Amino acid sequence: MTKHILSLTKTLLRNILPVLRARFYFRKAVLQGSKIRIWGHPSIHILGKMVINDRVRIISTITPVELVVDTGAIFEIGENTYINYGVSISAKHCVKIGRDCLIGTYVNITDNNFHYVDPDRRNEIPPSSDVTIEDNVWLGTRVIVLPGVTIGKDSVIGAGSVVTHSIPSRVIAAGAPAKIIREL
């Protein structure tokens, strides 16, 4: 009987704690479902609007996930999206991630470069360009998505790629800068 109670307790903790952790970390966000889960301890700063849809899973165990939404910015994560550890996403204006996406370890997504290249203007913040990752996109480990990029539905971005321009739907792209390798 004691083993059964212990097993039941472990199962409850394994299933309930990630949901409670999500409620705590996303307390300033708009939650669109009850099955949002977080494992580990992410770094989340919400000054704008963050929308998290149902069945979003965030693994922040080995290296914290960083999610930053600046004042007046919009950041949205679609239903059933998986974000792995070490991911860093910054929304200064608008970042949208579609449903059923897989975001690999150490991916970096930003809608602003945070400084100009010109040495005389490096202390100025340039305007933001929206980033959109459409439904069912897979970003491999260490992918960097730069401002103004749209990644089309059902596409795959290979590990270590730097996405500097928009990628169409149903393709595999890789490299620095990312180029289309083949269609799916």
Image: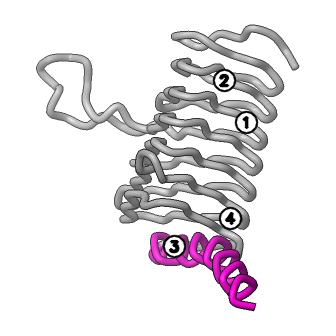
What residue would you read off at disc 3?
Answer: 21
Which is in the foreground here, disc 1 or disc 3? 3
Element class at badge 2:
strand
| CB contact under 8 Å: marks 1 and 2 | yes
What residue would you read off at disc 2?
Answer: 157
Which is in the foreground here, disc 3 or disc 4? 3
Q: Residue at x 71, y 11 (%)?
A: 180
Residues shaded magenta? 1-28
Which is in the foreground here, disc 2 or disc 3? 3
Task: Report, in whole angstroms, how far the alpha carbon at label 1 lies from the one at label 2.
Answer: 8 Å
Q: Quadrant of residue 112?
A: top left
Q: Is residue 145 left or right of residue 78?
A: left
What residue would you read off at disc 1?
Answer: 137
| CB contact under 8 Å: marks 4 and 1 | no
Q: Quadrant of residue 32?
A: bottom right
Which disc number belongs to residue 53?
Answer: 4
Q: Amino acid at mark 2?
A: Ile
Which quadrant, please, contains the C terminus?
top right
Direction bottom: furthest residue: 1
| Residues packed near mark 3 inside 10 Å, few (<14), some (14 to 19) or many (20 plus) | some
Earlier in the chain: of badge 2 and badge 3, it is 3
Earlier in the chain: of badge 3 and badge 4, it is 3
Q: Residue at x 41, y 39 (%)?
A: 128
